[in-house]
Image (cartoon, rainbow, N blue to C red):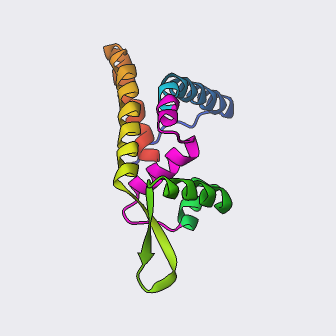
Amino acid sequence: MSTLTAPALDSSATEQLAVDLGEVLEALLERTAHTLVERIQVHDLSPIHARLLRSLDRSLAPLHPEELAERMQLELRIVLRALNRLNERDLVIDVPTPGDQGAATLALTRRGRAIVHDLDHVRRRDLRAFVEGLDHTERRRVEAAVSLLSGEL
């Protein structure tokens, strides 16, 4: 049984494809980021606060600050400072770690979860508006690209 493989792209074609992909992703981000940033500001948060809340929302269990810092690829001191602010605003809560007296993990409060869901709604609304503006052919091309990229991520 033979295995079919796609022909290899030469390095200049690969480079151009990478540049094109970067430009498309940047344009899409610019189209949708403005309203999301405004919404983050409505909640009196910074983008780092919003990312922390979203990471906690996506985790299956409460996380240690070190785990959050690693996931977000940020210095621990930055994460700790942001978590303190979120804790003061009752958006995250310390959850004792069973069997480890000194360690606490963090989870979202109801208020924190409500903010994440609000921000997700804004993000989905803007992306839906983008997709609705595509014609049939463009939509099929986006579907194929999303399918391909989803398998790679």
Residue 6 screen position, x and y as percent = 48, 38
Query: Is residue 15 found left or right of 68 in the rendered image?
Result: right
Q: Quadrant of residue 144?
A: top left
**72 lies above or below 138:** below
Residue 98 screen position, x and y as percent = 40, 82
Q: Magenta region, mostly helix, strand or loop?
A: helix
What residue do we see at 46% from left, 42% from top?
Answer: 5
Q: Residue furthest front?
A: 88
Query: Is residue 30 found left or right of 74 in the rendered image?
Result: left
What residue do we see at 59% from left, 54% from top?
Answer: 82
Q: Quadrant of residue 8?
A: top right
Near-viewer residue (148 or 10): 148
Near-viewer residue (84 or 147): 84
User: Visible in this render: residue 1?
Assistant: no
Tell me which segment is drawn in magenta: 37-64
Total residue callouts: 0
Residue 56 screen position, x and y as percent = 44, 56
Magenta includes 46?
yes
Query: Is residue 13 found left or right of 88 in the rendered image?
Result: right
What residue do we see at 38% from left, 66% from top?
Answer: 61
Near-viewer residue (28 or 54): 54
**69 lies above or below 96:** above
User: Visible in this render: residue 144?
Assistant: yes
What residue do we see at 48% from left, 52% from top?
Answer: 89
**98 lies above or below 20:** below
Residue 2 screen position, x and y as percent = 39, 48
